[in-house]
Amino acid sequence: MGFAVFLLVYIYVLQQVHDFTIQDWQQRYREDGADPRALIGALVARCAGPDTAWILLLDRSALAAQFEQLELRLAAVGGDRTRLPLYGVPFAVKDNIDVVALPTTAACPAFAYVAAATAPAVQKLLDAGAILIGKTNLDQFATGLVGTRSPYGAVPNTFDARYISGGSSSGSASVVARGLVAFALGTDTAGSGRVPAGFNNLVGLKPTRGWLSSRGVVPACRSLDCISVFALTVDDAELVANIAAGYDDGDPYSRPAPATAASARLPQQPRFGIPQSPQWYGDKAAEAAYQQALTQMQALGATLVPLDFSPLFEIAALLYEGPWLAERYAAIEDFIREQAEQMHPVVRTIIERARGISAIDAFKAEYRRAELVRSAQHLLRDVDALLTPTAPTISTIAEVEADPITLNARLGTYTNFVNLLDWCALALPAGFRSDGLPNGIALIAPSWRDAALTAFGRRWQAHAPWPLGATGATMRPATTASAAIADSSLVRVAVVGAHLSGMPLNGQLSERKAAFVETTTTSTAYRLYALPGTVPPKPGLAKTGEGAAIEVELWDVPVENFGSFVALIPAPLGIGTLELADGRLVKGFICEGWAIPAARDITEFGGWRAFLAASNTATAKE
């Protein structure tokens, strides 16, 4: 290749790699035959230059070592890239998470040390083929929700640089929102993995504590800390979390997920608890955007139940006004005793409050927390999850610098209580405010309901798709590649006729604890037929190569119940592999060829519901 051609290719790549989801990166490698060295080399070159979101960008030699490891991993799986679900996908980690041979600063240069080992959650991502390109800025020692408390500089909002990015995982949110990486790890103790997501139009997944190992993380509050995930889509966030998760015997706070966790789902028409008297601190744009999101939720079939959030707000107050500050002090005890003058002044002021906390105070607060946990559990008795604003308002960087404590505290209104309750949460984009800034909402549920939240998050994503971060790129449907790691406890089945929601045989799915995922269509290679003499009436779906997109519903059936479901399916129907419109391959209903000649071709209706509706209309007219 001549130098001029190489230069043109390099410039093209440089321009194209800034808005990629995991799915996009996988497609480049799978279909375009791209070389990770070329794509990521161009990407890192684009990241060079002043940028407060980064504390460290890896140099050529560090990247080269990762590419060598990637080749070894690929060879170990026989060259099958589908067995490396993050093959060549670039990511970043918050700089309070260890990566071997790299410095960990926690945004405090005097505290920095070179990590002796890689955090297990990060190592799992590397083992899946991901490429780490750098470590990101944060509110020092993960103390703050603003993204301004760092000697490396304030990280600006990706939509309007006058405003804060949110913190403490400010840099991780920024680099994902701008498409510099496909995903990033943050941490979350009081909302640090959710507030920056809401402010930058991202998905922020705050997992159940202990699902992802927190070994190798500089603690904020060790008993509450979680590694969190920032991504452009729900699919990407869930994929990353599933790969990074797993019990770690070396982490005393790690715990194995219960067998039912992966199959947890919200009802198709969920009941969401919302704050009955939300506090907006005078931010009318935030209030209006949240109301609009609630209207969209109702259109999706959700019932909204106003609740008194007082017990939750009292729990939230314990985090910074109670003895849990002592955990922050314990995490850096030697450093703050010997080098407190090296700390960010606001962070130092907050953490040094712990010196006045006694063991008696700690026990009293824990007793009160336990009482409030019981009240919170009662609050959830009649709802499936909570639906809140991610944050009640947003401030400019200048406003936060002028009043750093008060304005920061407001941002945790709907996040601070989650970790103290041992709950999980999912921050989701929800359109934009009247001033052009992103609006964020959050789903909150008890521990081990993570899969239920992400499943509903995908429904929300399909109902109200958002532009990808701050890239300006539009979302496209998921493909097989994006679902490279499937939940082994579930079988995803496409139903096309009498098993659809509200149809006569749908109960066979609900009896087996199957969960609705989404409504979608097949590829255009299928034709639909009304089968004669079937009771109740049923259609047959056949792949002919030429046809139309046929409406189907996807349901997740627990593996242990799948066999009994299949046993109920009468000839000429059976279960085979269906191709969806977006390229995904799932199990689904098919029809044996011998039954087709006697059946009526109803492909033109595009689905069984539409055919029945038309038939009923015709009958009524007759």
Image: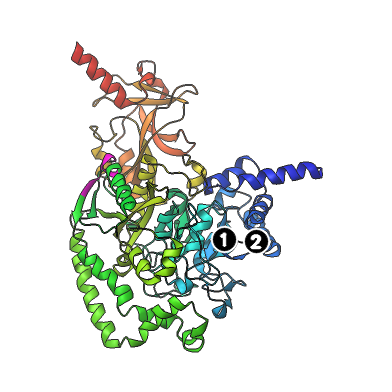
Could you tell me which residue is drawn at 43 percent across and 76 percent down? 346
Say which amino acid is labelled 1: Leu
Could you tell me which residue is drawn at 31 percent across and 34 percent down? 569
Could you tell me which residue is drawn at 66 percent across and 43 percent down? 33
Q: Nearer the viewer, residue 618 or 60?
A: 60
**How far is mark 2 from mark 1, CA to CA?**
9 Å
Mark yes or no: residue 475 visible.
yes
Could you tell me which residue is drawn at 56 percent across and 80 percent down? 110
Residue 320 x/y as whole percent:
33, 74
User: Which label is found at residue 126?
Assistant: 1
Q: Quadrant of the N terminus?
A: top right
Say which amino acid is labelled 2: Gln
Do callouts 2 and 1 mark residues in contact (Cβ within 8 Å)?
yes
User: Which label is found at residue 66?
Assistant: 2
Secondary structure, mark 2, is helix
- Does 301 appear in magenta? yes
User: Which label is found at residue 209?
Assistant: none
